[in-house]
């Protein structure tokens, strides 16, 4: 197939839902793939929309993206649109919430509905989102989980003293920090255990200790190498609508780095457990479950091995066919309509 895609390369979401799978389709399946420029007002290569079989758009719904989509359809090009978060349900007060709630949120919702009227297929990593987009008018929806690049698996792990607990969390996870007792739990561990250190990537916690480190930003290509410094990774989620639509990607990233994890039994994590390299934790059990893993290195090693076995089947090379099938389905739908 001749494929073009529109995805923000600097965004983790754009990487997993656009750049990485489209690159894999070119490198592993031999398709012709072109990344379109994302800047508002940036011109497309002349005539490109007449040369494609399918155009894949991640999240974009602004006027430029809608115009590109309509021009592509007018030239007989199949169109897929992907969204991997229920941004309309993002909690108020957290990072970027104003862009997706209130009047601005209604404007974006209307733009999405206009775009759904011209697409042939919607892709999403979440069954919850698939149901939502179906209700909003998507003609067909395909659930494709997030997969990790093969090169990110099993980075080198350096030995160190003590036990490091880490939370890799975007700024929107401030909502989870406010709703769950994680701050108090981690502060208690730091106060009572001289062998425990805590690091958060992204979100900052109000922890008082010289054994707490906050890393504002980690480049995506180096993420699993940084996570490999952890002994336990945590993935707490509050039971709110926004989180029920999320994906299980964070647990795959921990597993790829060789890190056992503890997660809330919410949304994408609810069906996972020891066979995937970790355990589910009720809101009132975080201190006990963290202490258990801190005290039992053998259990940490056993969970890490199980996680490594699981994530080996969750790579792009093993699953790029799901993207190929989805785009092929979109082409078939477009040609049938034509």
Image (spheres, rainbow, N blue to C red):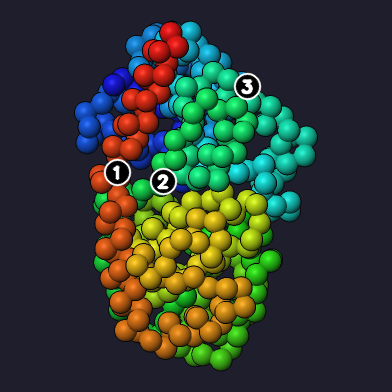
Residue designated by label 2: 145
Vertically, is 295 above or below 24?
below
Disc 3 residue crowd, few under 14, some 14–19, many 20+, Cα 10 Å:
some
Dot 1 or dot 3: first in sequence order is 3
Secondary structure type for disc 2: loop
Residue designated by label 1: 319
Helix, strand or loop status at disc 3 = helix
Counting residues from the start of the chain, the first of labels 2 and 1 encountered is 2
User: Looking at the rendering, in which quadrant would you find the C terminus?
Assistant: top left
Which residue is outermost to the right?
Answer: 103
Mark 2 or mark 3, earlier in chain: 3
Residue 202 vertical placement versus 119 (above, below): below
Identify the residue at horizontal 28%, vertical 37% (top origin).
Answer: 321
The quadrant the N terminus occupies is top left
Residue 293 or 226: which is nearer the viewer? 293
Q: Residues within 10 Å of mark 2 (few under 14, many from 20)?
A: many
Could you tell me which residue is drawn at 49 percent across and 70 percent down? Answer: 280
What is the distance, in whole Å, between disc 2 and disc 3 at their CAs?
25 Å
Res. 80 visible in picture: yes
The answer to whether marks 2 and 1 mark residues whose Cβ atoms lie closer than 8 Å is yes
Locate residue 74, reporting x and y percent: 48, 8
Q: CA distance from mark 1 to mark 3?
A: 31 Å
Q: Say what secondary structure mark 1 lies in.
A: helix
* Residue closer to the observer: 307 or 172: 307
Answer above or below: position of 214 versus 242: below
């Amino acid at each position: 197939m001749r494929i073009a895609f529109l995805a923000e390369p600097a965004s983790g979401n754009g990487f997993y839902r656009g750049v990485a799978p489209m690159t894999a389709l070119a490198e592993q399946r031999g398709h012709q793939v072109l990344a379109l420029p994302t800047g508002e007002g940036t011109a497309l290569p002349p005539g490109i929309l007449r040369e494609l079989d399918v155009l894949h758009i991640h999240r974009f719904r602004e006027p430029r993206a809608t115009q590109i989509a309509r021009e592509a359809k007018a030239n007989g090009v199949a169109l897929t649109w992907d969204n991997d978060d229920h941004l309309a349900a993002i909690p108020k007060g957290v990072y970027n919430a104003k862009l997706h709630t209130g009047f601005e949120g209604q404007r974006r919702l209307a733009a999405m509905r206009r775009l759904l009227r011209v697409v042939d297929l919607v892709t999403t990593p979440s069954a919850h989102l698939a149901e939502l987009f179906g209700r909003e008018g998507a003609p067909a929806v395909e659930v494709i989980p997030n997969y990790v690049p093969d090169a990110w698996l099993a980075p080198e792990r350096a030995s160190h003293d003590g036990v490091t607990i880490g939370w890799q969390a975007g700024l929107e996870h401030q909502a989870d920090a406010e709703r769950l007792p994680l701050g108090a739990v981690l502060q208690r561990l730091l106060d009572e255990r001289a062998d425990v250190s805590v690091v958060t990537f992204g979100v900052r916690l109000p922890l008082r200790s010289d054994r707490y480190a906050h890393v504002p930003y980690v480049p995506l290509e180096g993420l699993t190498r940084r996570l490999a410094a952890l002994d336990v990774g945590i993935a707490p989620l509050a039971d709110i609508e926004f989180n029920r639509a999320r994906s299980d990607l964070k647990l795959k990233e921990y597993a790829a780095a060789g890190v056992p994890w503890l997660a809330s039994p919410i949304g994408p994590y609810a069906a996972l457990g020891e066979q995937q390299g970790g355990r589910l934790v009720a809101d009132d059990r975080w201190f006990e479950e963290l202490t258990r893993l801190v005290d039992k290195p053998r259990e940490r090693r056993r969970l890490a091995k199980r996680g490594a076995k699981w994530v080996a089947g969750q790579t792009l090379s093993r699953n790029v066919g799901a993207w190929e099938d989805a785009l092929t389905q979109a082409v078939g739908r477009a040609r049938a309509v034509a």
